Image: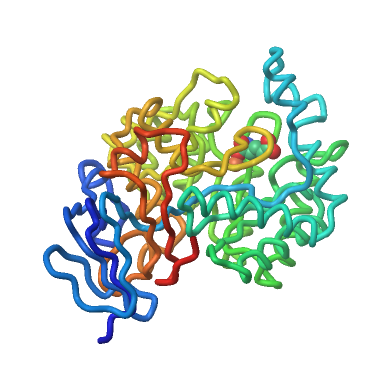
Amino acid sequence: MAVDTVIVNIAELATLAGPNDQPRRRKDLGDLGLLKDAYVAIADGKVLATGTGAPPPAKTVIDASGCTVTPGLIDPHTHLVFGGTREAEFVQRLEGATYAEILAAGGGIHHTVTATRAATVEELVRSGRQRLKRMLACGTTTLEAKSGYGLELETELKQLIAVKQLAEEGPQEIIATFMGAHAVPKGVDGDVYTQQVIDEMLPEVARRGLAAYCDVFCEQGVFTPQQTERIGRAAKALGLGVRIHADELSDLGGGALAATLEAASADHLLMMGEQSVQALAKSNTVAVMLPGTPFFLGMAERAPARALIDAGVAIAIGTDFNPGSCFSESLPMMMTLACLHLKLTPAEALACVTINAAHSLGLANRLGSLEPGKQADLVVWDAPNHAHLAYHFGVPLVRSVLKRGEVVL
Ligand code: NIG
Ligand code: FE
């Protein structure tokens, strides 16, 4: 087969090659399938071969001397599309207010709900596009994006339509998640709103094919485990996958509930108890750590990542990009925090934002590693080896990005 593009002289190539039927667990998490002085050959938007030695001839040759090449990064948890920003709340928090206090007082998510209801689809697309550009500059080639700042059918649909438009524009692939159950609207009873999500919102989202997943914020003062379970089961009955914001600010057994629901992911998990660890270990649910969130909220708690790895839980890492609890599009930043705060190795952190993030989104057959037949989504980093991605923090290290074999940055 004719080679379209070959990337040559790669100082270190992290292929992440390995079995793709299961997420990487335990020791396998840190096995990156590294090659030194390597090449990647691309044909038809797919990886044709990786190797060392003499590369095959190709129409386009990209020199990656001194660089690391990895699969395109995959962000399994973002709140990409919303109106307004919340820098005033950031200052309030610096002055001592907590995230939960601000939310309970009607600010926080509710502030963004007001701004998102007021925004047009075009405005949401325009701001979303800028954020995607920043994500691309940080190496993200695929991401999940949630609604959840409407808390009413019309605005939730508006957010998902904006996500769809952005996905059609590219270059990134975007997997949409309906999160009508992100907060209970002001002045509405939680059970009444839960019923509305189940009876009115979910069926319409499913009918229009606007989301692959449904997410619920299972939290003290937000949605109870019972309400979460009802919404999760309704979503599954409509053919949607389930993701859960679990055990973020309090331990309600959200991790175990996610396992019971056979959810694709249980996210946050700062406060999770042993029961949830054991339940997730026996499941295919991926535990998505979001280390930027406690960092940005000034919390001392950390997700028990090492205990999860030791127990055999599959873990991934995302940004949780949103205007309140983590206003950063950068997965490399999250890799640094995963090393410093969750005690992951740089290698494990890389697997968490590539192959295991792909698994949490059901995309691992096509994305997340550089192996023959897989999509040629990759990043050329201005870094001599993969450890620099986490170690050399807070600066732009992306030199170039390819999506489906095309140079997009
Ligand atoms: O994942 N936990 C709930 N939702 C987001 C925050 C959303 C917001 O503050 O706007 C989170 O942290
Ligand atoms: Fe979130």
Where residue 345 sits, quadrant-wise, is top left
Residue 81 visible to the viewer: yes
Residue 279 falls left or right of residue 79 = left
Residue at the image point whose x is 40% and y is 25% from the top: 341
- Residue 290 position (above or below residue 96): below
Q: Quadrant of the N terminus?
A: bottom left
Closer to the camera in the image, 408 or 203: 408
Relative side of 399 to 38, left or right:
right
Q: Residue furthest bottom?
A: 1
Image coordinates for residue 276, horizontal then vertical, percent: 43, 35
In front of the other: 270 or 343: 343
Furthest residue toward left? 53
Foreground residue among 374 and 239: 374
Residue 92 appears at what percent x and percent y? 74, 19
Q: Position of residue 144 (x, y in %)?
A: 55, 55
Residue sitting at x 22%, y 64%: 39
Q: For this view, does 328 lie left or right of residue 76?
A: right
Vertical placement of residue 300 versus 295, above or below: above
Q: Is residue 223 something one can see in this rendering?
A: no
Q: Tell me the quarter of the picture where residue 365 sits.
A: bottom left
Q: In the image, is 121 to the left or to the right of 39? A: right
